[in-house]
Amino acid sequence: MTLFAACFIIIPALTFPLVVLAYFLQLNRKRREVDRLMTGNTMSRYVKAYGKLEEGEMFSWYCDWREYILPVTLNTIVVSGTIYFILVQWGIITMDAIPPVIQASGGIPLSVIWGLTGAYIWGQYDMNMRFWAIDLSPNALYSIWLRFLVSGALSYILSNIIQPPFVLLVAFGLGAFPVNTLSAFLRAQVRQQLKYSGEALQTEQPNLHMLQGMSPEIAERLKEEYIYSAQQLALANPIRLLMNTGFEWTVILDLIDQAILYNYIGPKIVDVHKAGIRSAMEMSGIKDYFDDEAPGDLQMGIDLIREVAKRLEWEEVSVKNLIETLYTDPQLVFIWQLWEDAFATTQEPESPAIDRNAA
């Protein structure tokens, strides 16, 4: 094996350990941000909700370098091994005996090479984007080598279906899709060929898109954290999302806040937006108009309940019950307190959540 061939095999695979090493230097930025947020009231509230952690344990709990060893090793082996077999097939590396894998396949088809190349390039793109967003989790690294294998297999299948040169473009583009998208496509094709419909399961329709700011990219990232619905997001641990994703702290709190309200009123959350209410905090805040002695505030509270009842097509007493329920909801109180802490000033915050907690 020549030095050129050895470098051609090793260098592309070295990107994985090198990027991960640089990523842990990049994590210092997130550590400083977390340390800033998890001080004072925020930390005490987190401990009350999820239990006590030792000093420095929170960061190591979510960012343990040992969890990166296996996915980095797998990516390195898969990329190096693939390049090695391709170079053997092309005759750049000469051997007395051709590896059985290449002999059995009759050589690696050009479409598969394009598919593997696309998987590598798109995997590098995804890894670099997550690096700068400080969102390079072990799970993301696992998906790269899996995408590599799935893209190669699908490219081989498509080479017998789609005619060149379009098959090369399609094969290259397969690597741009997440592994779950590729697996869903493969399952659909198998079901179609087998004419298998399976048992019809009654499940809730996707609803994350009903929340403002829920882009396809954010929804896909939440799925990586096993959050598939508004109900799961409403009950999620916000600190875990902060540590595991690259989302801004206030964005996480706002999405959870909206999800809590969606759990109660469903798709009608869009109609309630027209009343100037977009989250559970704003809905529960209507109660404060009735706690204020000012006549104008009392009338405002009455008018808001009537407006919300009309848009929800509910009885006014049901809206009042919703407001009371949200006002004492433990998760909402927690989120409200964290929201206040995110915009902490030298003055004592006056939100209903803080008042409730003191009471």
Image (cartoon, rainbow, N blue to C red):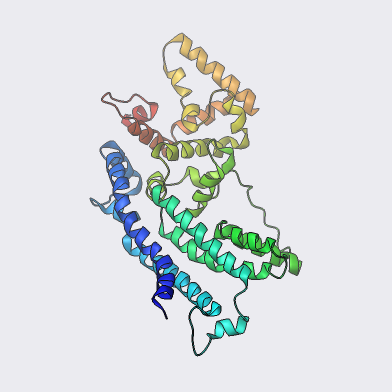
In this view of the protein, which residue sits in the foreground, 214 or 27?
Answer: 27
Q: From where the camera sits, is residue 332 visible?
A: yes
Q: From where the camera sits, is residue 196 visible?
A: no
Q: Residue 347 at what x, y percent from top left?
A: 27, 23
Q: Residue 96 at what x, y percent from top left?
A: 49, 90
In this view of the protein, which residue sits in the foreground, 166 or 341?
Answer: 166
In which quarter of the view is residue 63 placed?
Answer: bottom left
Residue at point 40%, 69% (across, down): 73
| Placement of the C terminus among the 4 image quadrants | top left
Residue at point 59%, 65% (across, down): 114
Check the image and report above or below for 42 versus 302.
Answer: below
In which quarter of the view is residue 89 placed?
Answer: bottom right
Check the image and report above or below for 319 versus 1.
Answer: above
Residue at point 55%, 57% (across, down): 178
Q: Is residue 107 left or right of residue 68?
A: right
In this view of the protein, which residue sits in the foreground, 94 or 61?
Answer: 94
Q: Is residue 270 left or right of residue 59?
A: right
